[in-house]
Image (cartoon, grey):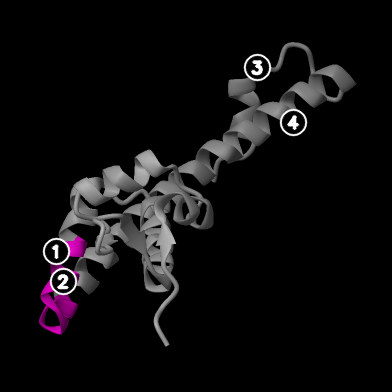
Amino acid sequence: MASKRYRIGEFSKLVGLSTYTLRYYENQGLILSQRDDNGVRYYVEEDIRWVGFILHLKGTGMQLNDLKQYVKLRAEGDTTIAERRQLLQRVKDNAEAEIAEQQVHLKVLGHKIDWYDGKTAHTIDDSESFHDYLRRFQD
C-alpha cells in the first residue's frame, strides 16, 4: 500500500508550520519534499515524524547550523551515530544550562513578588530593601 501523500497546505496544517516555513526548511536542507509527475511538492507520514523531531530540537534551542550538521550526518547513515550523539549531547547540556539559569531568574522573580506582597501586607518593614530581603535566602 502506498503511503498517503500530503500537499504542502495540508502538511502545513498537520505539522503546525506555515507553508513559508516549510519551504524555508526545505531550502535550508532540513526537510526534503518529494515531487509527483507534475512537479507538485508532497510529503508523506515519515515527514510528519521528522518535522516533529526537528521542532523538538529547535525547542531545545538548537541553532540552525547545528540542525544542518545533524541532518547532514543523519543522511550519511549509521557510521555517524557517535557524532550525532555527541552533537545532541552538547545541545542537551546547553539546554540544561539555560534551564538552570532560567530557574535562578525565576527564583529571584518569585522573591521580588513575595517582597512586594510582604510590603503591601506590612509583614516586611518599610525600610527593608529588596537587596536586604534577598540576603535572607542566600546560602
Q: CA distance from mark 3 to mark 4?
A: 13 Å
Stretch of the chain drawn in magenta: 70-82
Q: Place residue 106 in its image quadrant.
A: top right
Q: Could you tell which of marks 3 and 4 lies nearer the N-terminus?
A: 4
Estimate the spatial distance between the alpha carbons at disc 1 and disc 3, rounded to whole Å: 54 Å
Q: At x 44% / y 42%, what residue is drawn?
A: 18
Tell me residue 49's x, y (percent). 42, 69
Checking the image for residue 72, the label placed there is: 1
Residue where numbered disc 3 is placed: 129
Residue 9 relative to residue 114: left or right: left
Numbered mark located on residue 75 in the image: 2
- The quarter of the picture where residue 73 lies is bottom left
Q: Main secondary structure of the magenta part?
A: helix
Residue occupying image coordinates x 11% and y 74%: 76
Image marks 1 and 2: residues in contact by CB distance under 8 Å: yes
What amino acid is found at the position of numbered circle 2 in the picture?
Ala
Q: Which is more toward the observer, 57 or 48? A: 48
N-terminal label among 2 and 3: 2
In the rendered view, tell whether residue 122 sits above or below residue 31: above
Q: Earlier in the sequence, mark 1 or mark 3?
A: 1
State the CA–CA distance, disc 1 to disc 2: 5 Å
65 relative position to 104: left or right: left
* Tag 4: amino acid: Asp
Quadrant assignment, res 45? bottom left
Q: Earlier in the sequence, mark 4 or mark 1?
A: 1
Nearer the observer: mark 4 or 1; the answer is 1
Q: Residues within 10 Å of mark 4 (few under 14, many from 20)?
A: some
Please tell me which residue lies in front, 79 or 3. 3
- Residue type at mark 3 is Ser
The tag on residue 114 is: 4
